[in-house]
Each structure stands twice: as structure tokens, then as C-alpha cells.
Image (cartoon, grey):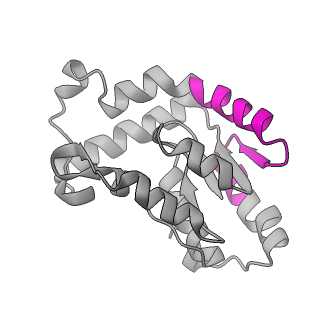
């Protein structure tokens, strides 16, 4: 199962919830991709192959090199197509929180100084702004390549909750509880 969307709509949060709810493996792709000092890890593709080789799993559909591997093996794609203003607001708040708290992310990395939003073309906020409109095209291309793939497009946070409690729970027999609600 894959979860896609631009930076900030809650892909990793939803993946973690789904992994718990469905009792399937999940490794956050940013944690697999980024080594110390924001250097891509040499074992990234090997680890993505290992995850996707399992019979059941959940992952974010991101990182250009990983998308073909994951897209070929997925049976369901959840597209978090939330309004960009909502997504951007979440991303900015998350980035500010991580920077001010100096939260340690993957492999001892921390958010860079805030001024880098102006100097780094690939700063997460600028990246999201630049590429938010490309997710739909990637989803469409995957639908054409894999017409049997089930795609669930969710446009509002309440739709995410309704899908988890309704269609997903019904399809999988999973029980929704507060333990998986993110609270």
C-alpha cells in the first residue's frame, strides 16, 4: 500500500497509522533515504527492494528512485490531495517546530537554519511549492501503467478519517480504535 501527496499533507503520519491498524511493515522513506548530514544513503534502493518484496507493507510514494519499485508492487494507492493552502500551512508549522526545537530527524539530521528557505532551491518548503502540482500527473501515469491498481483520492482531513473508519475498515476487517487515531 502506498500513500502519496506533496510534502506536508500527512503521508508519514497516515502510513504509521495504517501500519499499526493493519499490522504491516512500515519504514519511513526519509529515514531510509537520508544519512548523516543529509547525504543520501548508499543502501537506500536495497532497503526499498527489501520492503517491497514483503507480501504486505505500507510506504510513502516519494523519492524518484523508489517510486517505480514501489509503484510496481503496490495493490492500493492513497492520494492525499488536500488543499495546497492547508498542506503548505502544515508544512511550514512542522518545519518551524522542528527547527526551533532542534528535533533530531533521521540519522541525527535536523532542519537547516530557517534562512535556507531563501537560499536553498531544494528547501522542503520551496520544494513543496515547486512540485505540488506534479503529484496528480504521477498518479495518472501510474493509473495508466497499472489499471488494476486501486486509487483512493482523499481531499480533506475528514475524508481521511472517514476512509479509515469506513471503507478501509470494511475492506480489511480492521477495527478502528483510539490507539490508531493518532491521539
Query: Is there any visible trace of residue 28 in the rendered image?
Result: no
Magenta segment boundaries in residue numbering? 134-162
Query: Which residue sits at x=19%, y=49%?
Result: 110
96 lies left or right of 17: left
- List x then y, in percent, for residue 95: 30, 42
Query: Is there any visible trace of residue 73 in the rendered image?
Result: yes
Image quarter where the N terminus lies is bottom right
- List x then y, in percent, for residue 131: 49, 24
- List x then y, in percent, for residue 37: 15, 46
Figure quadrant of residue 73: bottom right
Residue 148 painted magenta: yes
Q: Is residue 153 above or below residue 58?
A: above
Query: Which residue sits at x=51%, y=50%?
Result: 10
76 lies left or right of 171: left
Q: Is residue 70 above or below residue 174?
A: above
Figure quadrant of residue 117: top left
Q: Is residue 83 above or below residue 59?
A: above
Of residues 17 and 183, the one drawn nearer to the viewer in this rendering: 17
Of residues 96 and 25, the one drawn nearer to the viewer in this rendering: 25
- List x then y, in percent, for residue 132: 53, 27
Query: Which residue sits at x=71%, y=63%?
Result: 164
Residue 171 painted magenta: no
Q: What secondary structure characterizes most of the magenta part?
A: helix
Q: How many marks?
A: 0
Amino acid at each position: 500500500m502506498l500513500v502519496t501527496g506533496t510534502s506536508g499533507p500527512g503521508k508519514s503520519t497516515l502510513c504509521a497509522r495504517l501500519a499499526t491498524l493493519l499490522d504491516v511493515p512500515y519504514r519511513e522513506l526519509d529515514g531510509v533515504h537520508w544519512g548523516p548530514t543529509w547525504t543520501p544513503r548508499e543502501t537506500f534502493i536495497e532497503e526499498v527492494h527489501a520492503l517491497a518484496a514483503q507480501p504486505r507493507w505500507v510506504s510513502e510514494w516519494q523519492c524518484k528512485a523508489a517510486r517505480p519499485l514501489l509503484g510496481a508492487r503496490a495493490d492500493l494507492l492513497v492520494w492525499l490531495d488536500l488543499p495546497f493552502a492547508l498542506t503548505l500551512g502544515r508544512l511550514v508549522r512542522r518545519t518551524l517546530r522542528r527547527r526551533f526545537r532542534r528535533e533530531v530527524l533521521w540519522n541525527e539530521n535536523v532542519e537547516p537554519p530557517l534562512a535556507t528557505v531563501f537560499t536553498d532551491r531544494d528547501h522542503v518548503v520551496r520544494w513543496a511549492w515547486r512540485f505540488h502540482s506534479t503529484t496528480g500527473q504521477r498518479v495518472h501515469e501510474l493509473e495508466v501503467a497499472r489499471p488494476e491498481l486501486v486509487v483512493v483520492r482523499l481531499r480533506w482531513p475528514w475524508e481521511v478519517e472517514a476512509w479509515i473508519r469506513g471503507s478501509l475498515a470494511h475492506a480489511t476487517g480492521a477495527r478502528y480504535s483510539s490507539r490508531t487515531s493518532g491521539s
